[in-house]
Image (cartoon, rainbow, N blue to C red):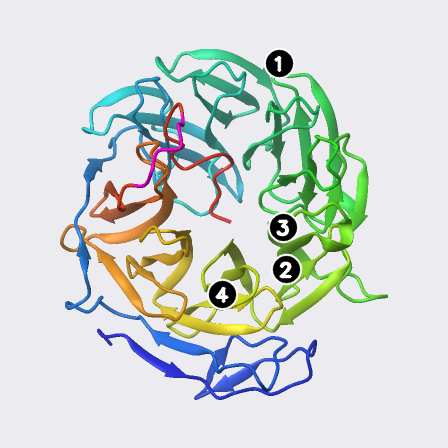
Amino acid sequence: MSSDRSRLTRRVSIVAGALTIAVAGGVAVCVGPTRAADAEPFETDACGAPPADSPLVAPWRTITLDAQYGGHWVVAGDVDGDGQIEIVSAQNFNQTDDHFTSAVAVQKLDGSVLWRWGQPKLGRRQLHHDVACQIHDLDNNGTNEVIVAADRQLVILDGRSGQPARAFPIAQHASDCVVFADLSGTGWPAEILVKTRYGQIWAHAADGRLLWTVKEPGGYPTAHQPWPVDLDGDGRDEILAGYAALNSDGSVRWVFQAEQGRRNRGHADCWRVVRVAQRPEDTRLVMTMCGGNALVMTDGSGKLIWRVTGQHYESVDVGEIRNDVPGLELVVDVDHLSTPSKPLCLFDERGTPLGRIDTDYTRHHILVDWTGDGVAEIGTALPRALFDGRGRRVCRFAIGESERPSLMADVDLTGDGGRDVLLTTVRDGESKVYLYRSRPADPPGRKRPAGTGLNYTLY
């Protein structure tokens, strides 16, 4: 179907806090705790090619990724200090889900290669998970580095030249991702977290000193990416690490339990922060449970606030999507479905379903205030479009003929405070990055464009 069809699902009237899944026409619908008085959730069919009459946004820049060293993992930031972002793409070596970064290419906005690093014949260009390659000003000297978890070593590459500024050993397979946190309370994320796929996390100082390590936090597998957040206001980050929260010294702060007396199933896919308050009971965190098939909200002590079950919820975006709904809203994709359409589900902060957008593939989605009105649009790589909080298509993004969209990211291209869109595509082995600028906003005085930001993740 090539046109959008907004249609209403049947209402599910249940007691607030109850948990269920509704089925409409044989298709699972995103349903959670709701009230009979709530408005009916929308359902938008966005499968197939985008409609030709929807507004088309032309790219601001198009970059063909380096064929030798580049890969499908892409982050963006100003690495050479010239005030413009560069495109950093990476390959990784993978064997039974144990993987490490094997090659990196950094390119200017005109497509020219600034520098290359690594062994391009060792790894693969394709994506299956996060690649441990990030942009960060680790030493807070005003210049970004490119930091990778390679084979049994953490390598900090000078942003201007690509030469290793320093490196230190890490454990074998501790290269699933790289995360930066402020564990020491200096006011800057200068500590480095690395991990295996599911089993263990290590925290290192910037000079490589091992600060602590934790196996299976709280007795459970790790999440795909540890999530730093200062839960108690002491200036030091705690780490949401699977079903457990860790203190800044690596000790277990609390362990989430979905059901009293029953062990959690599977692992935590992702954590996001809705808000941090002075009192833990007023803090709100959201998590998805792989194996537990649930989207849950907790307070700052890990206490369950609500839970929506019945689907393999994966990654969550949190933001102001509907200004007519109290609090913030949550967008979460549903993965591992046998049906062709893959839904993006929209919930309010209470877990009430507001609607869903069905697409051909929804794993890579974003929130971006494209129109500059303070309300975010929902972006998804396939069908390369933005939607408002009622499921109406705002625009589609122009790409080359027969190219397949891959990743979509929100990105600050110029430092003017506007949030823009990055989209990657693949065709016949050739990969491209498309950059689309939103309307300019008042400059907030940033020193450099933020690019894709700190601790970028597919999860």
Residue kind at label 3, given as amino acid type:
Arg
CA–CA distance between discs 3 and 1?
Answer: 32 Å
> Is there CB contact under 8 Å for labels 4 and 1?
no
| Res. 360 visible in picture | yes
Classify mark 3: residues with Cα within 10 Å, few (<14), some (14-19) or many (20+): some
Classify mark 4: residues with Cα within 10 Å, few (<14), some (14-19) or many (20+): few
Q: Looking at the image, is mark 2 or mark 1 earlier in the sequence?
A: 1
Q: Nearer the viewer, residue 404 or 408?
A: 408
Q: Residue at x 50, y 79 (%)?
A: 28
- Which residue is under mark 2? 289
| Res. 216 visible in picture | no
CA–CA distance between discs 4 and 3?
Answer: 29 Å
Q: Residue at x 72, y 51 (%)?
A: 243
CA–CA distance between discs 2 and 1?
Answer: 35 Å
Q: Nearer the viewer, residue 281 or 77?
A: 281
- Which residue is under mark 4? 336
Give the magenta range. Answer: 441-446
Q: Nearer the viewer, residue 383 or 85?
A: 85
